[in-house]
Structures are given as structure tokens and as C-alpha cells.
Image (spheres, rainbow, N blue to C red):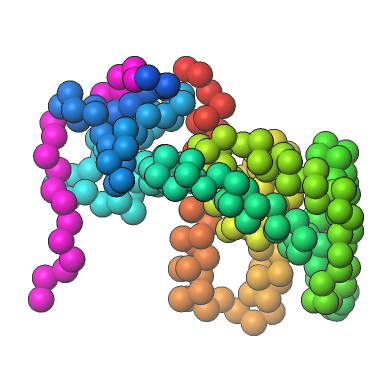
Amino acid sequence: MSGAWQPKRFWEKSEVVPAEGGYTVALDGRPVRTPAKAALVMPTRALAEAVAREWDAQDDLIKPQTMPLTRSANSAIDKVAKQHDEVAALLAAYGETDLLCYRAEQPVDLVARQAAAWDPLLDWAADRLEARLRPTSGIVPMPQDPDALAQLAAQTRAFDPFALAGFHDLVALSGSLILGFATVHRVESPETIWQISRIDESWQQAQWGEDEEAAAHTALKKQAFLDAARFFSLLERDD
């Protein structure tokens, strides 16, 4: 049997054009619309140009999996803009059980690796975000300071729908609200922050070897994280 139906390329030229509220991509002069049929209007030319390049790169068949920026822009318009408060609350809740706060009790080497990588980021959050989260050992949940959580929640709600769409993937894929903020504030490169989020998995891999299927899944998640970081960075450019 043949595979699932895929739409075919139907246009010759894609270009960025001004639109009310920002920029859109036109295919042979016709503006692109989201899956929900809304206008695909993006806040910066940089993002619109990157989205246009994704459309240009399509061959005979359109492959959505090769268009991460387009997908994130669609999500910002069709989903996040309509559920902004709910999405912000979902992400802010990661602060209650943030990855960086739950440490191994042993072995000593893993405990040291976590502390070396994660403590500076908790210190950064206390200083830059005015939110001190406290680490603990083991998996039993530990209540965090309500004022710290409120600070993080307020800063999460402050993102507009496009920024929140990118931020969503950074937080959900890393498992850490603090790492999401560290990425958008460019504390470290997205590549480095991804590695910081994988300390436990990297240690296990070093001890027991790498499972091929798990490695493939991790590679997809890593690329999605890097794509989200790029999406967010394009929102900060006005060229």
C-alpha cells in the first residue's frame, strides 16, 4: 500500500511581503495561511524570511517535518494566542519541580556533575530572574518559595504568543523552566544548555552504553530544542 497522502508543491516563488501586524510569506503572490485558515503574519522580517526559506526548500512533496519554524508560527497563531494564559500556567508549573532542583543521591561523580552544571544556573536565576529555587536530593517533591514561583510565572506570562510558543518547546523538551529562561537570555549556547539538561542521561549512557532507538529519539528532541531556540532568536531581530 502507498503511504499517507502528502500535499504537492504547487508554487514557483515564495517571497516575504509586509502585512498588517508584521510580515507574511506569499506563494506566487498568495499569502500563506495557517492550518486553521488564519493569516500567517509574523512579527519580524527575520522570522518571515526564515519561514520563506523553509517553503523554498520543499521539493515535489511538502514535508511539514522539515519546516519547524513554520510549525511554530502556526502554533503561535492557531493555539497559543487563543490559550495564552493556560499555556503560560502550564510552563510556569515546571518551576515547582524543575529538573535543576532534583539531584541524585549517589554516585558521587553524578552528584558532582549535577552540582557543577546546575548550581550556577540556579544562582543566575536568583540574581537575574529574582527567583531562588532550592535543590533537593531524591525524587520526593519539595515545595518552592511561593514568591520565587510567582516571579517566574509573571515573566512567563509576559511573553507574547510567538515568544511563548518557542519558550514552550524549550521548557518542555529540557524539563526545566530555568533552562528555558537561560536559553532565551543567552546565558549559554542552546547546544550547551541542551547538554546541561541531559547530564543524567549522559551519565547513564557512559555507564551502560547507548541504545540505538533511544539515541535516535534523543537526536530528534535535541534538534527540536535547537529549532525552538532559533525560532525565539528570530523574534528578537528586526532585519
Instruction: Please identify the dominant SS of the magenta region.
Output: loop
Compared across the picture, whether 15 is left or right of 119 comes to left
Residue 48 in the image: x percent, y percent?
A: 38, 28
186 is higher (above) or lower (below) than 212: above
239 is higher (above) or lower (below) than 86: above
30 is higher (above) or lower (below) than 190: above
- Quarter of the image for residue 65 reads bottom left
Which is nearer the eye, 138 or 154? 154
Residue 13 in magenta stretch: yes
Residue at the (42%, 40%) spot, across then down: 77
Residue 175 in magenta stretch: no
- Quarter of the image for residue 204 reads bottom right
Compared across the picture, whether 2 is left or right of 32 comes to left
Residue 142 in the image: x percent, y percent?
A: 86, 68
Which is nearer the eye, 208 or 59? 59
Which is nearer the eye, 56 or 41? 41
Span of residues in magenta: 1-19
Residue at the (47%, 17%) spot, across then down: 239
Residue 217 in the image: x percent, y percent?
A: 48, 68
